[in-house]
């Protein structure tokens, strides 16, 4: 219970208009702040550009960037430890040389300087990062492909949309999708098999719907085409098949 | 073009839509409002635009999971709120010592407000905790009911009520002190 609500209870007659005033002031202030803004006009172009970049490349770039940042952070974190270890080592070496004055000098490798070990550590870290990128990139790609191919939704629209946006910005979805449909023959034939059994699907609507919507969505959306010319999207029992955790 | 999200009438969603057309239509209807929402949350127009564009990309990718335009809009709004929450964290990592913000550009952001009272409210809004600010912006800028505010923030309606009550109490105090 807040102080504000407490005040409202004590003096509701006075508090309600005050509350309404505050609401109005808030609304006006927020709209006055945000409404005059003019976003850059190339927003859609930038979105389409981001979409046209293949996701594997995008993810690989992100992975490389993240790994580079991580390597830099690790180097920064471990720098004091390296410095301390190097100092200890040099102290130990100096004591050792004092105890054994006739001992020959250390080989050149050991006298290379205090920078050698941090440098080696950095090189090692970089090698690990490169190895991780080389190994994890294809593995991740394979996993993504497997999940896309095996799942009922198969992610076809996002993939098809991503590629169709690159070159055919103003084209109709039918044109862009007829181009993409041969790339997934198994999926398309399965969908075609399903749609051909549906009695209400007209030949004009199914080519546009079938490639664009994933196989999981096509049975739920196609029946809505023919009987409802008003194009409103009706709920359908088969929508309960949608994975429950679809919220971001 | 410049209308609150709740008031923007969604065009009838055809089943023949694919992700591209949906994205284009939703961009035309809601892009500016979403940028306004993000701007109020992150206080920076460039970041706000990036956040909204990323949200549109995410919506496009997840289009097969959206049932209709309403759901896609809710997805977009939730995505904008989430990304606006993480954008300052990301900015703090890549830019540990940010340069102080420049002078307010007229007509952009919370720096240019017509009345002193609104400027006071805007200043107080900036000082609110992030969750309270999100609740306030979604409630009073987008004119969303509490249930949709809760859905966009990913919290319960009770939590939204709590955030709103605390935020309005803080703002009320600031306004009264200013008067």
Image (cartoon, grey):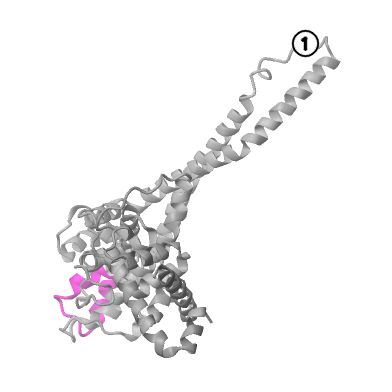
Place residue B40 in its image quadrant: bottom left
Give me the residue at 42% from left, 60% from top: A146
Looking at the image, is B113 positioned above or below residue A134?
A: below
Residue B36 visible in the shown view: yes
Mark 1 surroundings within 10 Å by alpha-carbon count, few (fewer than 14), some (14 through 19), many (20 or more): few
A138 or A81, which is in the foreground? A81
Task: Tell me which residue sits at (16%, 84%) in the image.
Answer: A230
Residue B124: percent from left, percent from top:
42, 65
- Extreme front residue here? B179
Q: In the image, which residues are magenta?
A: A191-215
Residue A160 sits in which quadrant? Answer: bottom left
Residue B136: quarter of image: bottom left
| Residue A202 covered by magenta stretch | yes
Quadrant into which the C terminus of chain B falls: bottom left
Q: Is residue B32 left or right of residue B89?
A: left
Q: Residue at x 26, y 79 (%)?
A: A221
Residue B169 percent across, percent down from the top left: 46, 75
Query: Which sits in the foreground, A209 or B38?
Result: B38
Observer-nearest of B49 and B174: B174
Identify the residue at horizontal 21%, vertical 77% (top origin): B9
**Residue A216 visible in the shown view:** no
Residue A6 highlighted magenta (yes or no): no
Subunit ID for the residue under disc 1: A
User: Residue B58, image x and y in percent?
Assistant: 35, 62
Query: Percent x, y for residue B166?
Result: 48, 74
Q: Quadrant of the N terminus of chain B?
A: bottom left
Q: Is label 1 in a helix, a strand or a loop? A: loop
User: Which residue is tagged 1?
Assistant: A104
Q: How many numbered marks are there?
A: 1
């Amino acid at each position: 219970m807040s102080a504000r609500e407490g005040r409202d209870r004590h003096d509701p007659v006075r508090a309600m208009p005050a509350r309404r005033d505050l609401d109005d002031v808030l609304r006006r202030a927020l709209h006055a702040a945000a409404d005059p803004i003019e976003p850059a006009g190339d927003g859609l172009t930038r979105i389409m550009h981001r979409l046209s970049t293949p996701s594997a490349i995008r993810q690989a770039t992100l992975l490389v960037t993240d790994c580079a940042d991580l390597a830099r952070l690790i180097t920064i974190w471990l720098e004091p430890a390296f410095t301390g270890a190097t100092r200890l080592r040099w102290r130990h070496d100096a004591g050792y040389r004092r105890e054994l004055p006739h001992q020959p000098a250390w080989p050149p490798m050991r006298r290379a300087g205090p920078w050698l070990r941090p440098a080696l550590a950095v090189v090692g870290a970089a090698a690990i990062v490169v190895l991780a990128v080389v190994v994890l990139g294809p593995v991740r790609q394979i996993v993504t492909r497997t999940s896309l191919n095996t799942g009922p939704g198969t992610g076809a629209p996002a993939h098809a949309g991503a590629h169709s946006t690159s070159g055919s910005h103003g084209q109709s979805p039918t044109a862009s999708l007829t181009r993409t449909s041969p790339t997934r023959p198994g999926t398309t034939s399965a969908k075609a098999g399903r749609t051909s059994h549906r009695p209400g699907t007209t030949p004009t609507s199914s080519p546009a719907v079938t490639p664009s919507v994933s196989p999981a969505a096509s049975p739920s959306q196609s029946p809505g085409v023919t009987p409802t010319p008003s194009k409103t999207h009706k709920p359908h029992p088969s929508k309960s098949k949608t994975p429950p955790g679809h919220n971001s | 073009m410049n209308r609150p999200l709740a008031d923007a009438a969604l065009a009838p969603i055809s089943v023949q839509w694919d992700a591209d057309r949906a994205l284009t239509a939703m961009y035309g209807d809601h892009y500016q409002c979403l940028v306004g929402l993000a701007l109020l949350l992150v206080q920076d127009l460039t970041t706000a635009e990036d956040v909204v564009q990323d949200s549109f990309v995410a919506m496009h990718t997840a289009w097969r999971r959206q049932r209709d335009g309403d759901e896609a809009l809710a997805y977009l709004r939730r995505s904008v709120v989430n990304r606006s929450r993480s954008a300052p964290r990301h900015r703090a990592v890549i830019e540990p010592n940010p340069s102080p913000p420049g002078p307010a550009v007229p007509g952009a952001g919370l720096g240019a407000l017509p009345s002193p009272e609104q400027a006071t409210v805007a200043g107080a809004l900036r000082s609110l905790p992030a969750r309270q600010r999100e609740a306030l912006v979604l409630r009073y800028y987008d004119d969303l009911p509490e249930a949709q505010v809760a859905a966009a923030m990913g919290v319960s309606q009770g939590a939204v009520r709590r955030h709103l009550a605390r935020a309005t109490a803080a703002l009320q105090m600031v306004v009264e002190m200013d008067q």
